Image (cartoon, helix red, strand yellow):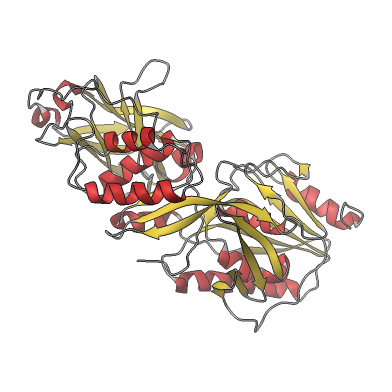
Amino acid sequence: MKFEAPLEYFLLTGLALTLAAGRVPAAEAAPAPPATPAAPPSGCAELGEPRQVSLAKTGGPFAQKPIASYDAYALRGRRIWIHIRATNTSAEPASISPILRFDPKPDGSVSFGQGQWALNLAPGASDERVLRAYALPNVRVVEATISSAAAIPGLDLAVTLRCSEQVYAPGAPSAREALVQEAADLYFSRALHAPENSQEARQTLALRATGAEDSQDVADAVTAMMNSVGDWHSYFFPRAELPIFYGNLAPQPPQAEWLDGGIALLALKAAAFPDRDGLLAYARAIRAAIAPLASRHPVGWILDLRDFGGGDMWSVLAGASSLVGVGEVGAFSTRTGRERWIVSPGRSAVDGVSLADIGAADEPAAFEGPLAVLQGPATASSGETVAVAFHGRPRTRFFGAPTSGITNTGVRQHILSDGSMFGISEVENVDRVGHLYSGALTPDEATEPGDAGRQAARAWIQSRDGPGL
C-alpha cells in the first residue's frame, strides 16, 4: 500500500488524538531499572480471564474511565497485551479511545500511558483494539481505561489480558530489533524534534520495545519515544493498521453553498488516501463543487477549514487552484533548504515534482476577489498547511480562533522494510511571502464558535473596504 507521493500531512496531536482518532501521548518514560528482574510467579493465566463490562449511557464526554485493573506483580518484566472488544448495544453511534496506564494516581498522573486508535462503532457493531507494552520490573498496577469526546449510548466490553512467557531484562533486544533500529536511525537523522544527543531517547525506545514480538509492538514503542522528545505529529503505522488509519480519515464530499449577497462557500474536512486514484478523485470533487458557484460570479468566497483536521493537502491545492492562485503559494523549510509549493490550474507540485494533477480542462476562472478563511482549534496538520497556502494571497482575511498549532509542521512518509508507514515531522511551513510558521495560526478577526465566523466573513466581503481590499 505504498503511496506514490513523497509527502503527505496528517493529524496526530496529543489531546486531539485522544478525543478524535486514536493514539494518545505516552507519559515520559521511567528510567530503566539497573537490575535484571527475577521471574515473578506465572500468574498471567489467572489474570487473563476475560472480564465483561457493561457501560450504561453517559451524560457527556469523559476521560480515563477504568474498565479493568490488574495487580502487576505477576506481569513484571513481561510483555503484555490487553485485548478490548467493544459492542455498541444501542441505536446510536459511539466512539471510545482505549488507553493503557501504569500505576495511576489519584491526581490522574501515571508512570506511563499509551493509547490506541479510537473504536468508532455504528449501532450494533463490534470492533477491537489491543493495548500493548513492556511491564517494568517495578510496576505495581496495570489499568485499561477508555475516554470519549462525547456521550456514549451504551457499550458491552470484553477485556482479556495476555502476557509473554519470558521475563525480559529492561532494554533487552527483542525479536524485532532490526525494525527498531531501522526506525530509530531514520528518525534521528531526519526529524525536526530529534535531540542533538539521542542517547536518552534511544534508551526510552529500547526500554519500551523490550520483548516486542511484531510491528504493532514496535509502533507503540516508537510512539512513546517520539512523545518523550515532544513530538506529537510524527507517526508509525504498521501495515496491518493502515486500513484503520485510512478509515478514520475517509474523505467526505466537499460542501459548496451559495449564500445571500452573492457569496460562495466551500467547506472541507480531513481526508487521506491509500492510493493516487483516491487523491485525484477528491481533487476533481473539489473542483466540481467550485465550478457551478464560480459560474455565477460570486462577489466573494468563504473557505471553511474549521473541520479540516489533517490528511492530504495536495488534492486541495489542485482542486481549489482557482481560489488559491497559481505560482509559488508556500514552501517547506527543511534542514537543507526550502521546497516550494507550486500551483498551476488543476495541479499542485513541490519543486517540479507533481503530487496531484487533474488537468486544466474544466478549470473555473481564477478568482481574485475577496476570500475569507474560517479556522479554529480543529484546524490542524494539513488543514493548517492549506491555510498557510492562503496567507499572503491578496484580498484574503482569516476569521475564527487559533488553530491547533501543535501540528503546524509537515510529515514526510517513509515505507520501512516490513511495510510499515513511518511519517516523520521533517519540515515547517512557509507562506508565499516568506513568513515561517511553527505554532498556531492566529486569525485576523477572532469570532465565537458556530455561525459567528461565517457572519463576520460575509460582512467583511460585503463591506468591500476590509483590509487588503
Image quadrant occupied by the C terminus: bottom right
Residue at point 47%, 33% (across, down): 61
Image quadrant occupied by the N terminus: bottom left
Viewer-closest of 189 and 272: 189
Residue 315 sits above or below residue 169 on the image: below
Decide if residue 84 is on the left or right side of residue 113. Answer: left
Decide if residue 402 is on the left or right side of residue 135. Answer: right
Q: Residue furthest left?
A: 42
Residue at point 49%, 42% (across, down): 193
Residue 140 sits above or below residue 113 on the image: above
Number of numbered callouts drawn: 0
Query: How far across and down, in percent of the image, does residue 198 sit?
Result: 40, 38
Query: How far across and down, in percent of the image, does residue 254 sit?
Result: 59, 64
Decide if residue 58 is on the left or right side of residue 158. Answer: right
Quarter residue 461 falls in: bottom right
Q: Residue furthest right?
A: 465
Residue at point 71%, 58% (across, down): 390
- The answer to whether any part of residue 183 appears in the image is yes
Quarter residue 387 falls in: bottom right
Query: How far across and down, in percent of the image, does residue 119 sit?
Result: 36, 45
Viewer-closest of 352 and 244: 352
Q: Residue furthest bottom?
A: 361
Q: Residue furthest top?
A: 106
Viewer-closest of 178 and 93: 178
Query: How far across and down, in percent of the image, does residue 446 sit?
Result: 76, 40
- The answer to whether any part of residue 152 appears in the image is no
